[in-house]
Image (cartoon, rainbow, N blue to C red):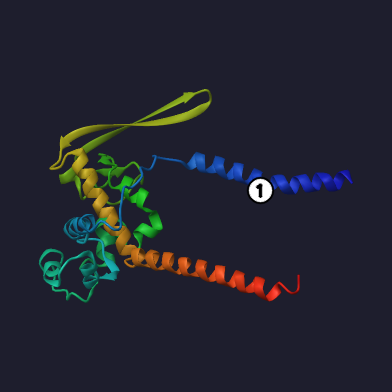
Amino acid sequence: MKTMNRLFVALLLAPLAGLLIAGKALAAEEGYRLDRAPIDPRDLVSLQSGARTFANYCQSCHSAKYMRYNRLEDLGLTPQEIQDNLMFASDKIGETMTVAMTEAEGKHWFGVAPPDLSVIARYRGADWLYTYLRTFYRDPKATTGWNNAVFPNVAMPNVLWTLQGQRALDVVKSDEGGDETVSYKWRQLSPGLESQVQYDATVRDLVNYLVYVSEPAAVESKRIGIAVLFVLGILFIFAYWLKKEYWKDVH
């Protein structure tokens, strides 16, 4: 009997122990703390600004091959505005957002081919992208001269450095009470075209756009989902009343 009780307790505690071990493992792998991305998929002005930043700074290397230019009309842009401001090649407005750079060229120049950004927000998450694009720093040891606090030894240089300016990062490690802590101290080496607040807003808009690109119908899908749940709730009430009516004679 005691053996059975011990086995029962062990089975109950096993999931908890697993969670504790996983928590410690995650804590050990923790790096730079991610900031919350203040995005709003319903903000058309922000999405338009993000599309412009993407076209001007990202699309020379990164494609978004699962996104078509004409979907940008959902952001309130006209076909002419899309062609004049967001298309710099001979692409037709119904074509996907591809780039001229081949995979082989990307590997030759950067050591790895720049990834397609169609679903990068689904893979990385908005908070990761928002923090990543704001934590580049100068590193003379890196091949490109740039490194990143969120993605150490990244092959990508800071393509937005003219807006943000150049920064340096000092990583300070301390061992207090047996637990190692890491603190990050930023230094501005040279100013950019935008202030810190302005640059954060630029990155927010770009991340907002990348989230939209990963699922253009997300807002409409959520709206439809809420309507469906509301209708199902009403149908459930009628179904419950009908069930009571059928079973009242049984009980």
Question: Is residue 116 in view from this perspective?
Answer: no
Identify whether 212 is placed above or below 150: below
In the shown orientation, is residue 20 left or right of residue 134? right
Residue 20 in the image, given as x and y percentages of width and height: 60, 41
In the rendered image, which quarter is residue 131 located in?
Answer: top left
State the residue position of label 1: 15
Q: Residue at x 15, y 40 (%)?
A: 192
Residue under the image location 15 percent in, 72 percent down = 79
Residue 119 in percent (x, y) is at 35, 63
Foreground pick, 74 / 98? 74
Q: Secondary structure at mark 1?
A: helix
108 versus 68 height, above or below = above
Looking at the image, residue 238 sits to the left or right of residue 4; the answer is: left
**What residue is drawn where x is 23% and y is 46%?**
201
**Can residue 234 be seen by looking at this rendering?**
yes
Q: Position of residue 92 (x, y in %)?
A: 17, 76
Count the labels in the image: 1
Q: Residue furthest top?
A: 177
Relative to the observer, which residue lies in front, 229 or 149?
A: 229
Residue type at the position of mark 1: Pro
Find the residue positioned furthest to the right: 1
Is 70 left, or right, of 232 in this rendering? left
Look at 48% across and 29% down and name the residue there.
Answer: 180
Q: Quadrant of the C terminus?
A: bottom right
Relative image position of residue 30 (x, y in whole percent): 46, 41
